[in-house]
Image: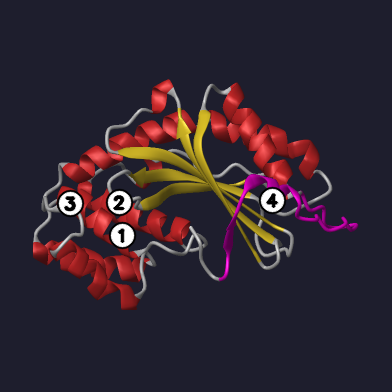
Amino acid sequence: MLHCGAHAVERGQVAEVNTPQRTETWTPISHEYLIDEVSRTLNASRMSIAEESHALTRDGQRYFGLFRIESQDLANKDYSTVMGLRNAHDKCFPAAIAFGASVFVCDNLSFSGETQLARRHTKNIFRDLPQVISRTIGQLADKWSFQDKRFDAYRNTDISNKEACFLVREAYRAGACKKTDAMDILDQWETPNHPEFEDRNAWSLFNAFTEELKGNLIALPKRTQALHGLLDGHCGVLSADELPATNVANN
């Protein structure tokens, strides 16, 4: 999860980061407050944090967290459910949750959607944030159930080498990868690092992408969401109108 100068820290170190003073138009929240509210809501929803990682960059102004979530309803065979958090004190981006999956055999990480917890840090953010987090986490069971169906469809869709080349090109056009990533993704498709992805199907191609897209947690949600959009269409998962909503925001 580390990128662009970020460094891993313990949760206690996150709490030591100073939060800037509010202004008439901007009300920042502490990184610790965001973590605590999400943790409290997960516990109330009978979900537990099995593992957690935290990172800071820009002298603590930007925070990124990654949590592996467990519950009786979210047990999976070969990947775990994950949640990413972000928060900023430099007005770079709003507080947000991203949710997705981490494949056990390789730690490949992907995000199915991102929910902004506030469009900006306004004076009402402390009033609204607990309710927004509660609604967002309340939707996660349905979103992760959809994720199971999506990955099953990927496994059941055969992909030829010609189709793989076409999909990599279309992924670049959709913003799922950079042009310089394309050959590495195809190399990973042709000779995967892990034998679990030797099957010639969309699941193996998906993991060829996520294997090569590791290392930039800022860009990863948008890239893997674009990749899901491409592969969902190819595998006939669902039409865009049928996809679950992914945005819950307050002003």
Q: Secondary structure at mark 1?
A: helix
- Give the mark nearest the N terminus, 3 or 1: 3
**Residue at the spot x=28%, y=49% of the render?**
232
- The residue pinned by badge 1 equals 211
Question: Is disc 1 surrounded by few (<14), some (14 to 19) or many (20+) residues within 10 Å?
Answer: many
What residue is pinned by disc 2? Answer: 106
Q: Which residues are magenta?
A: 5-29
Relative image position of residue 209 (x, y in whole percent)? 29, 61
* Marked residue nearer the N-terminal end (2 or 1): 2
Majority secondary structure of the magenta segment? loop
Q: Residue furthest bottom?
A: 180
Q: Disc 1 marks which amino acid?
A: Glu
Badge 2 vs badge 1, beta-carbon distance below 8 Å: yes
Q: CA distance from mark 4 to mark 2?
A: 28 Å
Q: In whole angstroms, how far apart are the C-alphas of marks 2 and 1? A: 8 Å
Q: Residue at x 72, y 63 (%)?
A: 91
Residue 36 relative to residue 216: left or right: right
Left or right, 70 with reference to 168: right
Residue drawn where x is 61% and y is 49% of the image: 96
Q: Is residue 131 magenta?
A: no
Is residue 82 visible in the rendered image? The answer is yes
Q: Are marks 4 and 1 in contact (CB under 8 Å)?
A: no
Circle 4 is placed at which residue position?
A: 14
Distance from the alpha carbon under mark 3 to that under mark 1: 11 Å
In front of the other: label 2 or label 1?
2
Q: Which one is in front, 243 or 139? A: 139
Asked which secondary structure carries label 4, the reply is helix
Tell me whether circle 4 and circle 2 mark residues in contact (CB < 8 Å): no
Q: Position of residue 29 (x, y in %)?
A: 77, 49
Image marks 2 and 3: residues in contact by CB distance under 8 Å = no
Residue beneath label 3, please? 197
Q: Earlier in the sequence, mark 4 or mark 2?
A: 4
